[in-house]
Amino acid sequence: MGSNGNVAAFQDGLQQPLNRADEVSELLDAVQKLIIPFIRSADEDAASKSSGHGLSIAGGEPRTSLLEHHKPEELVKLMKFDLPSNGKGKEGLLETVEQVLKYSVNTWDQGFLDKLYASTNAVGVISELILAVLNTNVHVFQVAPALSVIEKTTARTFANLFGFHGPHAGGVSTQGGSASNTTSVILARNNLYPESKTKGNGDYKFVLFTSSHGHYSLEKAAQMCGLGTENVWPVPIDAQGRMIPQELESLIIKAKSEGRTPFYVNATAGTTVLGSFDPFREIAAICKAHNLWMHVDGSWGGSVILSSKQKQKLAGVELANSLAVNPHKMLGVPVTCSFLLGPDLRTFHKANTLPAGYLFHEVNDGGDVWDLADLTLQCGRRGDSLKLALAWIYYGASGFESQIDHSFSIASYLTTLIQENPDLILVSENPPPCLQVCFYYAPGGRLHAEESKNTEVTSRISQKLIRAGFLVDYAPGDQGSFFRAVVNLQTRRGTVEGLVKAIIEAGKGL
């Protein structure tokens, strides 16, 4: 065998050359023939979205690429999915891939307006492929040198945008916004109360604060950290869904008077329902006065920092001790890609480092930590930062800005369409603070007196919309559940026009 570095495999006592590259090539070719039509079907469907329904087939029945919807028990029967004792090879693999595509939501479809994310794009697909080929762990520099450099550089550049300019500014990628928020709680506790790192919560009665519209991940974090959900105190909000600073300070004073230890405040940049941005400067002043850690959950709205038209909504965010932001939401980067950023990575290291001589061998270079798992709660770490890095290289910061500005213009346009329609009642501001638009279906502008009936109408219309090629979520409100349509980077004017038509049509006869 030649000295080309190819490792030999033993089969029946004979050395056989490896053909892994050929196998990958063969499977890629076969799978590509399935995924390209999947994406193309969404492209073709886009042309008819303005009419309020998907493409038409023979007989006049609507067809949509968005979703072939079935209830769970029906889908189990249709898929007949199981795991065999003996491998089914290429044929079995492709059959399963076909099923996955057939019965999954096609987020590339213009009608996917359901969650705070949507499809990725061509460069996103490439980045996932590269990560799969490398299949390495970005926990220590030794096994992921290039990806470690990319993560450090990308996180530092990202952090600089938010006003974190110190010599140790930067961040790390995490498994998602919830992981970023949980890590921030650990950073706060272990830095402000260092003994808690080894002794636990002890006699401290820790309390953390978040707005009543904050993400539920803060309660999850409190559970994981042994704080208990009762010690997550919700702060009242104003009519626009923003945390009221005076209410925050009153709660901090109340907690202290009860012998508790306030230590952390979570402010939100883009709340989950209304998309509101909290007043960061006022909150930061209160945190400084009471020696509390200020975290900003910008998982949704943090990406507006790339838009000169929108970034003023983040005024004061540079005063935070930590900040979460998810490029997989607003920037179209593949799920998952989340960052926890901060002005000083030494606080990350202090909170999370543990002796593990069998793992961490890199000596810190001037305070720089290159074994990235030593900055996080996790050990195994996927190189998710590559997904943002390649998108940034492909589009540039200016490209991101154009896409974000387009999204906000479409969200504003949808808001106006709803405001002008006599059968819809707008809940959001016009223009909305972020990319979700909230509203009720109310014929003649009148809602039911009973909240439950309004919720039922919203729920039934949302189900009828699926056949028309639109997937839209809903959330509880003061008068029952209302629609929450989420615009994304690729949403067109015709799509939101079609959505309004489809809702009005679906509402007839209810």
Image (tube, rainbow, N blue to C red):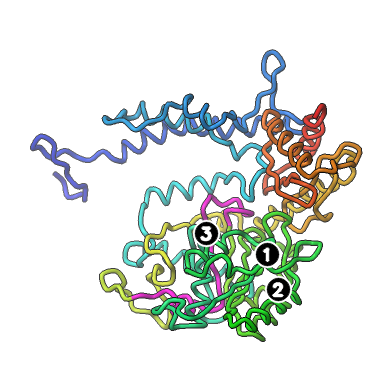
Residue occupying the point 71% across, 38% down: 459
User: Residue under circle 2?
Assistant: 280
Task: Point out the frontmost of discs 1 and 3.
Answer: 1
Residue type, numbered disc 3: Ala
Residue occupying the point 53% across, 32% down: 72
Task: Point out the frontmost of discs 3 and 2.
Answer: 2
Q: Are marks 3 and 2 in contact (CB under 8 Å)?
A: no
Locate the C terminus and report the quarter of the image it occupies: top right
Tell me the element at label 3: helix
Q: Viewed as shown, does residue 137 lie left or right of 461?
A: left
Q: Viewed as shown, does residue 256 lie left or right of 506?
A: left
User: Residue under circle 3?
Assistant: 389
User: Residue under circle 1?
Assistant: 269
Locate the N terminus and report the quarter of the image it occupies: top left
Residue occupying the point 48% across, 24% down: 78
Q: Are marks 1 and 3 in contact (CB under 8 Å)?
A: no
Q: What is the span of residues highlighted in magenta in the rendered image?
A: 327-354
Query: Neighbour class for label 1 at 10 Å: few (<14), some, many (≥20)?
Result: many
